[in-house]
Image (spheres, grey):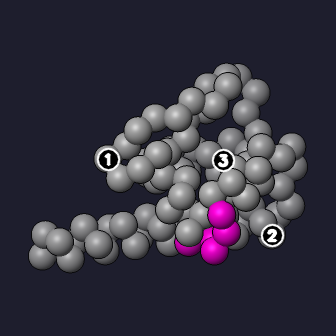
Amino acid sequence: MVRRARSGCGFFVSWKGGNMRNQDVRQAMQQDKLPLWRVAETLGVHENTLRRWLQAENIDTDRRQRILRAVQAAKDKRNAEGRREHG
């Protein structure tokens, strides 16, 4: 079951249920409270494309690594923007 929760800067997706696909990618996004659109923007794809990739049963290794790098890049970008606003 996919539940959408409203975060301060947009929607992020939380997954509920025992048998989640691509759990490592989803956990990385949830842990950093990154909205799906921000990671998709970093990847240069539409939010729906990223959602479809995450729903796939198997993501190939290259795509998984690309998504995880985008999660880290989105987190770094968000942190840099926060420092600029407060600095």
Q: Secondary structure at mark 3?
A: helix
Q: Main secondary structure of the magenta part?
A: loop
User: Where is mark 2, residue-wise?
Assistant: 62
How many C-alpha atoms fall within 10 Å of the one at disc 3: few (<14), some, or many (≥20)? few
- The residue that mark 3 highlights is 24
- Say what amino acid the circle numbered 2 marks: Asp
Q: Nearest to the eye among marks 3 and 1: give it.
A: 1
- For residue 76, above or below residue 3: below
The nearer-to-camera label among 1 and 2 is: 1
Q: Earlier in the sequence, mark 3 or mark 1?
A: 1
Residue 87 image offset from top left, x and y in percent: 12, 76
Q: Of label 1 and label 2, which has the lower sequence position?
A: 1
> Which residue lies at the image location 55% right of the left edge and 41% below the top edge?
13
Indicate whether 31 appears above or below 73.
Answer: above
Q: Which residues are magenta?
A: 42-46
**In the structure shown, which secondary structural element does the residue marked by tag 1 occupy?**
loop
Residue for badge 1: 8
- Under mark 3, the amino acid is Asp
Q: Determine the residue positioned at 56% across, 72% down.
A: 42
Categorize mark 1 by other alpha carbons within 10 Å: few (<14), some (14-19), many (20+).
few
| Residue 28 location (% of width, % of height) | 55, 51
Q: In screen coordinates, is 39 left or right of 34?
A: right
Report how far apart the C-alphas of labels 3 and 1 lie in the structure.
23 Å
Residue at x 48% of width, y 52% of height: 35
Q: Is residue 49 left or right of residue 56?
A: left
Judged left or right of residue 19, residue 85 is: left
| Left/right of residue 67 with respect to residue 84 in the rendered view | right
